[in-house]
Amino acid sequence: MQFFNILFLAFAAASVDAKCWKSGPKTQTSNISPYVGTVCDYLAGGYLGGEERYVCVVDNIGVKWNFSLERVSKGGTRQIDSAECQNGMNKETKCEFGGSTEYGNWKYGADPNSGRCQG
């Protein structure tokens, strides 16, 4: 029984951490963190089930970040505010190479790359 509890706790702890990518441009949270609020102000609002939105920004040292937010739950419209978005995106930006993780109704992605934002 004790082994099961330890295994369950390890799984539960892993499920709240970002799923970090293993390669790409190395980044530092301090270079992108000033922009996460603006990114999430843009992404906040009502989403239909399965809807995904994107925004691209360039950080303090010229790394392009592709942010994505997807509503993974189905049915009707669901709102997300900037604060909830920032909570999820900040977890992804703490990854050395960015990451993408599903938390409840939402899938957050922060993908650093070389190049420029288009559009």
Image: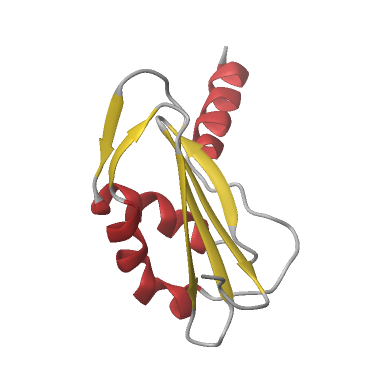
Work out which residue is located at the far front of the displayed protein and give it.
119
Closer to us: 32 or 65: 65
Task: Tell me if 2 is positioned left or right of 40 in this view.
Answer: right
Q: Residue 13, relative to residue 64: is it above or below?
A: above
The residue furthest bottom is 61
Q: In this view, does 48 lie to the left or right of 112?
A: left
Residue name at image x 60 percent, y 75 percent: 27
Q: In which quarter of the image is residue 47?
A: top left
Point out the residue furthest to the right here.
Answer: 23
- The residue drawn where x is 40% and y is 30% is 105
Q: In this view, does 1 lie above or below 114?
A: above
Which quadrant of the rendered structure holds the N terminus? Answer: top right
User: What residue do we see at 37% from left, 66% from top?
Assistant: 36
Q: Relative to 33, is 93 on the left or the right?
A: right
Residue 20, horizontal then vertical, whole percent: 63, 53
What is the basis of the colouring in this image?
secondary structure
How many numbered marks, from 0 up?
A: 0
**81 over 40 or under it: above or below:** above
- Nearest the eye: 15 or 60: 60
Residue depicted at 57% across the width and 48% down the height: 100
Q: Which of 6 and 89 is in front in this view?
A: 89
Examine the image and state in which quarter residue 46 appears. top left
Give percent across and percent down for residue 10: 57, 33
Image coordinates for residue 77, horizontal then vertical, percent: 29, 27
Residue 30, located in which quarter of the rendered image? bottom left
